[in-house]
Amino acid sequence: MAVRSSPPLPGSLFYLKRQRSCPQCTWGMEEKTAAQSGASGGSWELPGPRRISAVQYFNTAVDQNHILPGALRLIQELRPHWKPEHVKTKRFTDGITNKLVACFVEDDMRDAVLVRVYGERTELLVDRENEVRNFQLLRAHGCAPKLYCTFQNGLCYEFLPGMALGPEHILEPRLYRLSQSIPSVEVLEQEMAWLKEHLSQLDSPIVFCHNDLLCKNIIYNEKKGHVRFIDYEYAGYNYQAFDIGNHFNEFAGVNEVDYSLYPSRETQLRWLNHYLQAHKQLCKEGWGGTAVTPREVEKLYVQVNKFALASHFFWAFWALIQNQFSTIDFDFLRYAVIRFNQYFKVKPQVSALEMPK
């Protein structure tokens, strides 16, 4: 569809009115007003680690009965490099509050910009400023598409490819389970880099590990008074502290995970003391009867609990892959969420552990 050239729309930055702090939220709900921030170039942001960028505002309205001309004028401002004669449009008719049109160049619509025009007098029901605030807040945390601009009676935002669900879809377990929280790829990459840097400094020895010592992989023979390990599909050389930390994580179970069962510090210290005694007996340097020192136990305790973080990360990724391909009747996605949640829950206190002097 060809689009005639038109003069540029009057542009300015969009600002929100000062609001009182929300007593039930962890973020502040006060933004700079236009008068306060205009002199410095103009922007608004929420306190916290992620900066929320300003939203461009165009002082124009789009005719609800003739959306395309106004929508295409906005596209000229947002995508000036698009040749007007190459711009395609698609109307969406499912909405009952607003009118929506997509403008795009690529046939697969991966570059589409959505132009949403508010329904007549819907501001009587919807706080539009609050809508933009929520849009930006959710986008800052990776939960919403990009918001490109607002105008007098609408806004423009990023198109998310996919299928809009119908009533026949929302009861499918494989779909409704996806509303569970999986960290973004960016967050996972950051955590992976942090683990690599942090754990590599712990000097945990490389040993032959089972790498999957959940309870069912340990067989106890009461008559002979010994235990044996089974299922060696994940066995191989790994960090000593990973194998132990992974074993401690498995105290919580698999089908019904309960991390209140994770061993206490006192239980771990006793366990680790016995482990080190056995380890020294098997090693040449232990043949002389060298006793295990409290410092050795404490060092291993710190190493083990830090590597337990890597165990959560590993099995969460494992569960995501299994969720895509496994035919076993198990809620792998739920398990991935549980492991990721536990990782982020214990990371602060585990990170604070220090190696003994």
Image (cartoon, grey):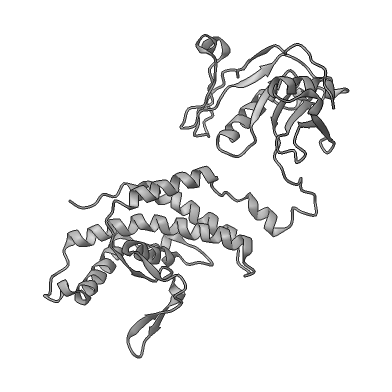
Q: Is the residue 60 above or below the residue 97 in the image?
A: above
Q: Quadrant of residue 311?
A: bottom left
Return the x and y of residue 93 as percentages of the image width and height.
Answer: 85, 36
Return the x and y of residue 316 as percentages of the image width and height.
Answer: 51, 57
How many marks the image carries: the answer is 0
In the rendered view, does 42 fall on the left or right side of 303? right
Return the x and y of residue 69 as percentages of the image width and height.
Answer: 83, 21
Q: Quadrant of residue 217?
A: bottom left
Question: Which residue is drawn at the image coordinates 76% and 32% (left, top)?
Answer: 104
In the rendered view, does 233 fall on the left or right side of 110? left
Return the x and y of residue 205 as percentages of the image width and height.
Answer: 28, 62
Q: Residue furthest right?
A: 65
Question: Which residue is drawn at the image coordinates 53% and 47% (left, top)?
Answer: 183
The answer to whether residue 81 shows anywhere in this view is yes
In the rendered view, does 13 fall on the left or right side of 285? right
Q: The N terminus appears in which quarter of the rendering? A: top right
Q: Is the residue 35 above or below the residue 82 in the image?
A: above
Taking depth in this image into account, of 29 and 294 the one nearest to the observer is 294
Question: Which residue is drawn at the image coordinates 46% and 55% (left, top)?
Answer: 313
Taking depth in this image into account, of 180 and 164 the one nearest to the observer is 164
Q: Residue furthest left?
A: 288
Q: Quadrant of residue 158?
A: top right
Q: Is the residue 106 above or below the residue 318 in the image?
A: above
Taking depth in this image into account, of 314 and 276 the one nearest to the observer is 314
The answer to whether residue 99 shows anywhere in this view is no
In the rendered view, does 64 fall on the left or right side of 207? right
